[in-house]
Amino acid sequence: MTKIFVYGTLKRGGRNHRYLAGQQFLGEARTTAGYTLYSLGDYPGMVRVPNDQAEVTGEVWAVDTAGLAGLDQLEGVNEGLYERVGLKLAPPFADDPVETYLYLHSLEGRLIIGSVWREQ
């Protein structure tokens, strides 16, 4: 099982939450400082912002191999839209190996959301 931090439409109540069906919810979480969210229209993109002191909030899920493949497809990993990377979270997940999806395309003209994505 791979622990995945989700911060947008995959969260409970989000329109893409169905992609986590059959996976295990481990708890609410937040990143360490250095990340922020941008609005990409109907969904957010998280990026590293080294000098940013904000933390992004989300959820941690234990995902099996099939579930991970589905998430990679949804997030456009093979198309270079997002990259699945290791991520350092704040306690209580600070010592756990966790991965997430970071947005890879230009942010020009995109609205900064900050720490919390709210389904629209």
Image (tube, rainbow, N blue to C red):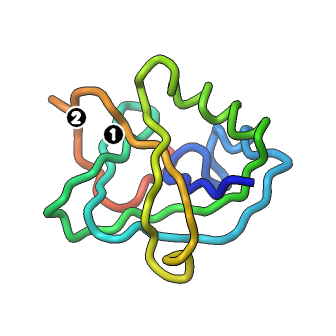
Quadrant where the N terminus is found in the figure = bottom right
Disc 2, disc 1: CB below 8 Å?
yes
Tell me the residue that label 2 is attached to.
110
Between 102 and 56, the one lying in front of the other is 102
Residue 38 in which image quadrant: top left
Residue 56 in which image quadrant: bottom left
Q: Residue furthest right?
A: 22
Which percent across, then down, holds residue 6? 55, 52
The image shows residue 113, relative to residue 78, as above or below, that is below
The image shows residue 27, relative to residue 42, as above or below, that is below
**In the visual, does 28 lie left or right of 26?**
left
Give the crowd class for mark 2: few <14, some 14-19, many >=20 residues within 10 Å. few
Identity of the residue drawn at 27% across and 51% down: 48
Query: Label 2 to label 1, Cα distance in Å?
Result: 6 Å
**In the visual, does 37 lie left or right of 118?**
left
Disc number placed over residue 11 in the picture, else none: none
Identity of the residue drawn at 61% across and 53% down: 11
Identity of the residue drawn at 44% across and 59% down: 87
Disc number placed over residue 39 in the picture, else none: 1
Which percent across, then down, holds residue 118? 47, 53
